[in-house]
Amino acid sequence: MLKWIGGKPDHPMSDLKEARRLLAELPANDAFKALEEITGWIESVMQAEGFRLDQRVAVVKLLDETAQQFQRKLARDYLTAPRLQKFQENRLWTSIFNFWKQLGRAYDQSILDYHAGAKGSGDVKASLPVLTCRGLRACSAQLKWMQMRYGPIDASIWSCVGKLYELAEAKGYARQPATLYPGIPGDFTPEQEFLKIMILWVSAPDGLIPLHLEIAERVTAHFSGSFFIEKPPRKQGTHWFDLAGDRAPSRLTPAPEAVGSTRFFGAGKALDELGQLTQQVEKGVVPESVNLGAAYKPGIVRDVLKHLALNWSPQPPMRKSERHRVKARLSVVSGFERVAEQLSEDSLAFGDATESWIVENISAGGFGAVVPQIKGDWIRVGCIVGVKPEGINSWGVGIVRRLSRHEQSQGRVGVQTLAKNARVVRLKPHDSKWVSSAPGEEEDYRTALLLANFPETGEALVLLKPGSFSTQQSFDMVAGSNKHLLLPMNLVEKGEDFDLARFREMRQEAGEEE
């Protein structure tokens, strides 16, 4: 299909004027089709023979700039849609990821061709900083979208990141500023783009849900000018990365044997600046100067900032309790409804709904486990699980806090234990109606899980169906033959299919009105 005729590329994009005309015909109201067409153009331009390097680079930059509005639209849809069907989620993810993958390859190969002295290299030299910045951003985007599905992470991307930065550093343009895209204010350097990747990926992204990961990436970009990097010997770096390797950056625990390709880095003064931003957000204000890509509730932003501060600190995050290595098998069910049904006294076996995990370590606050076979896509950070160790009759309740896939069907999870012996209870509003209900829903009582009582304070921790909690709504709770009045205190955590709340608990005597 692609020929060499008269030394010129036989390609529709070989003439920039014609390329612009073709791109102007892309469907403005169909981001899927537009982005997929651009992705195909990038791939074909890189495969076509006859392009001088400066011609190829000009076309790739044009395709990249045209694609940005479409990829932003699809990314926004992915993050903000309330409940995507599997087909929709897969279509969105695949379209976005394939674009960044082809774009990353294009910039990587163009930079390598320049350093190899390809024909047309002379006119590309001035563009090296912007090409490197865009190449690093494409690598970062691939890592992010892999993490959106909790992995697995392609190790070759870390090799690409190290190679791009190493070339920039060796050739003297690592700190040379460049305007990344037309219309986007501010200049960036290859070093900043590199450090944004490094700092984000030592911030425990496997403990963030997709929306929080998006916010974390933007906060990291906001503070990227305050991060630092140094060569051996290390002076103050808290983390390290091998430019010649294929492993993710990590904390210095312990410090590696430094070689010429080792780089040490850290958050530096950005940690104090992050603390100042957190104070503003805790007052209910998210400054307009911090570009998060959308307006988010201060509470959501605050949680992400605290997560980042914990991982940017020179001191590694401390566990609340010591972990012990074990090997045990665990039966697991997922989701509020299944957990509640499993905890019911008359529950039936779930068959295929029950999974088997292998616990590797355990502490007073939770456990780490291997998931030998991930069934479907239910498992994600923030989901509720019911767990029953082998040989134990009772079911406990926990929340998945960390998740990483090492292969498509296998992974590791970190689970926080909420209760080792939760109870199914029934709730109904006290002298009021439910604050939220499905259309036509008339039920008096809803199922809830009583996770813990605290007799010394008269409090109770309760897991409710999503949208059930309100600071204005008290509940009558039936637990076995006992009745209690629950007075709302605070919402501890809100998940996709649950509200975790704390209540003041008052026992109702026999004959007392509900």
Image (spheres, rainbow, N blue to C red):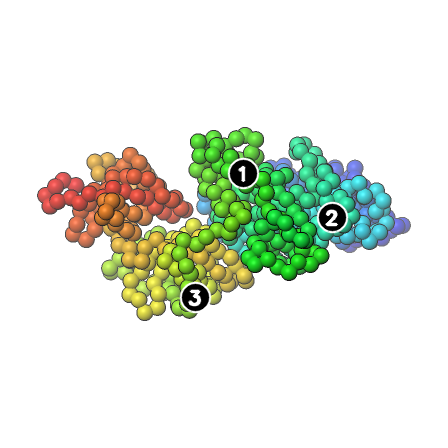
Residue that label 1 marks: 272
Q: Which amino acid type is shown beneath numbered disc 1?
A: Asp
Indicate the secondary structure of the residue bearing disc 2: helix
Where residue 483 sits in the image (x, y, percent)? 18, 47
- Residue 372 position (above or below residue 377): below
Give the distance between the C-alpha atoms of the residues marked 3 and 1, in whole angstroms.
36 Å
For mark 2, does the 10 Å Cα neighbourhood hold few (<14), some (14 to 19), or many (20 or more) residues? some
Residue sitting nearer the eye, 304 or 96: 304
Q: Residue at label 3?
A: 325
Quick one: label 3 or label 1, which is nearer the N terminus? 1
Quadrant that contains the C terminus: top left
Are discs 2 and 3 less than 8 Å apart at CB?
no
The answer to the question of whether label 3 and label 1 lie on touching residues, with beta carbons closer than 8 A, is no
Q: Give the x, y percent position of residue 428.
A: 24, 43
Q: Position of residue 304 (x, y in %)?
A: 49, 42
User: Circle 2 sits on which residue?
Assistant: 169
Tell which of 265 and 465 is nearer to you: 265
